[in-house]
Amino acid sequence: MSTKEKILEDVLVEEQVVKEHEIVLYNDDVNTFDYVIDTLVNVCDHTLEQAEQCSIIVHYKGKCTVKTGEYDYLKSRCAKLLQAGLSAEIV
């Protein structure tokens, strides 16, 4: 086995160990762009630019991943998005 193959094998194994989840935000016909942006800034610690980009993606594509990480880290953030009246889930 060459050194290059060994390094590639090590990288693939490491990627499989780390299981990240995502909060996916879905489009709705209720909340305004400004409200979604403000909520993403407050709940997901987005910059204004990140929140604006996510809201545009949600509007045109129907959904957008807004945060990634371990399930326990995302659980309370997703709950806050839901409490704020947004449609989101952890996948």
Image (cartoon, grey):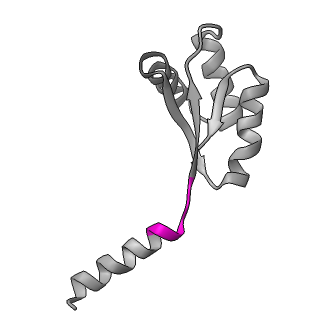
Please count the marks in the image. 0
- Residue range in magenta is 15-20
- Position of 11 relative to 32 (above/below): below
Q: Residue at coordinates 65% horizontally, 11% vertically from top-left?
A: 31
Would you say residue 16 sits in the magenta stretch? yes
Percent position of residue 58, x then y: 49, 22
Residue 75, image quadrant: top right
Percent position of residue 53, x then y: 46, 25
Q: Residue at coordinates 42% horizontally, 17% vertically from top-left?
A: 60
- Position of 85 relative to 5 (above/below): above
Nearest the camera: 7 or 41? 7
- Position of 66 relative to 60 (above/below): below
Is residue 68 visible to us here?
A: yes
- Position of 20 relative to 1 (above/below): above
Report the side of 10 relative to 51 (left or right). Answer: left
Residue 22, image quadrant: top right
Percent position of residue 47, x then y: 57, 32
Quarter of the picture containing the N terminus is bottom left
Residue 86, image quadrant: top right
Report the side of 26 relative to 42 (left or right). Answer: left
